[in-house]
Structure formats: structure tokens, C-alpha cells
Image (cartoon, grey):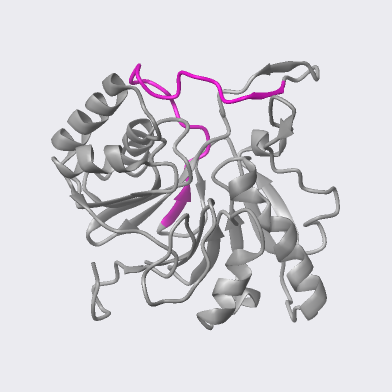
Amino acid sequence: MKLTVLVDNTTIIDNYLLGEPGVCYLIESDGVNLLFDTGYSDVFIKNAGTLGIDLHELDAVVLSHGHNDHTWGLAHLARFYDRTHAPRSDRIKLIAHPDAFLPKRDGKLSIGADIPADGHARWMDRIECTQPYRISEELIFLGSIPRENGFEGLKPIGSTLDSQGHAIDDFVRDDSALVCTTPHGLVVVTGCSHSGICNIIDYAMKVTGEARIAAVIGGFHLQNSEPGVLQRTREYFEHLQAGTLYPCHCTDLRAKIELDRVSRIGEVGTGLVLDFDPARAGAC
């Protein structure tokens, strides 16, 4: 598995790429090329061009959840294909929890995916999953994440709609993650971890039957977190004994410092490349 950060809040020094408060990773594994999230704008397309990455070669787009900083780039991707007359013989899979496409609001602000009805249909086939969905032999989209530990995913973020169209508190039940099995153990890839980073890892281990965690990268939902939540998260990772953690996006400095007490913390920014293939030089 190889992961290239195309969008993050920050950038890696001397790479001269663009950053924005969003997430977009290119993942190459098991003969599959996919985007995990698409950021907030067309920044990921510009960064891919700078890095010499051909987005016409994508097989899938996976959405971690339906917030705008992870999904609004999708419309830009559809326009990119339309304007470059993409020479594709097959269609791209668009994989997400079904609730990722529901309206989401924070007060008067729209914070949901806000994808036009025809924003992706020409190029993509939507696959909505609440159960784990195997993208390839190594890659699994986790679907609905059970929230079982009692300290994560307990507070709503804005509102969404129920099945009758009524506004209700949004606990971001559509929040999911991607897991890749590697010779080193699992690589868990998250967007914001609204369902809880510890819940996500527990479920990834349950779904795969693998207890070794090689790495975790993505937002850990530890921005201005309550001390009790941060403490229990630190205790979880102290017990887990994972490889390297790459907390970013919605994870603040205080949380990174706290986690660094019990785990190895890696730097993240646009341009970072992680390679977990032992056959290639520089594998993690």
C-alpha cells in the first residue's frame, strides 16, 4: 500500500504544494487506485498535477463522511473529467455510507456534501454501504462504525434530516474509515473520526481479524477535546502499542503532544508519501 497526501491543513516543507482545511489521500494498493475524500475545493487536482499523478487512472473514490471539507472536491473532479474529456472505458466507484449524502447544517450554514444531482452521475456509480465493503483483497471500507466504548461519538455536530425530512441532531452516523491489510499489520485511514478513533480501530481489527496496527493516519477528532476524552484516548493507544500514528486535520497540538507520550507520532502534510510495501525501498 502506498498513500500520498493530496490535501491536508498543512504542507510538507519544500514540496511547494497547496493546503486547505480538508482531507484527500491517494491510495494505491492491490492494483487499485482510489481517492479517500476529496477536500474542500479543486486543490487536490492542482496538487496531483504538480506531483505528476494522473487522476484519470482512478478506480474509486471513498468518502469518509458527508461534511463539506471532505466532499466538495467531488464536483470539481467531475468537472475535471468533463473538461479533459477523460478517456475512460469504465466508471469510477463512489463508495460511502448512505447518510453521507443527506443535508447537513450548522445553524444557517450548509456543511454537507451539497453535491448536485448530476455532479457525479456521468462518471461514477454510487455504492452505499452500511456493512463492510471489500474494495479489493487488501482494502475494506468499514461502513457503519459501532460506538461501544462510552466516551467517543457522543455529541452531535449540527443537524441533519430523519427519514421523514425532519431536522434532528447529527451524530454523523455516516462517519466511516478505510482499512488496508499489509505485511506489517493494518493501516487504518480516517477522515475526521466522528465515530471515535478508538471505536474505528477496534472495528477494523474485528472486521479483519488482525490485531497488529502498523499505522493510523487521518483526523482523530481531537480538536479542543475534553480532558477525559483525551486521557482515555491516550490510555487506549498506550495499551494498543500501534506502529506510527499520523494524527492530522481535526487533531490539535495538545492532543498530538499527549499521544506522543505513549506512541510514535509522524508528521503529516500535503506531499507526504507513506509506503507500506516491503518490496520497495523506504517502506515504513
Q: Residue 191: where, in percent of width, then height?
A: 48, 46
Q: Is residue 194 left or right of residue 117?
A: left
Residue 140 sits inside the magenta stretch: yes
Q: Within the image, what quadrant is residue 128 found in?
A: top right
Which residue is outermost to the right? 118
- Tell me which residue sits at (54%, 45%) in the image: 64
Residue 40 appears anywhere in the view? yes
Residue 231 sits inside the magenta stretch: no
Q: Residue 186: where, in percent of width, then height?
A: 30, 52
Residue 59 appears anywhere in the view? no
Q: Is residue 94 above or below residue 166?
A: below
Q: Is residue 233 left or right of residue 175?
A: left
- Tell me which residue sits at (43%, 59%) in the image: 10
Q: Residue 179: where, in percent of width, then height?
A: 40, 50
Q: Is residue 217 left or right of residue 77?
A: left
Residue range (magenta): 139-161
Q: Is residue 181 above or below residue 247?
A: below
Q: Residue 15: where, in percent of width, then height?
A: 42, 76
Q: Is residue 205 above or below residue 279?
A: above
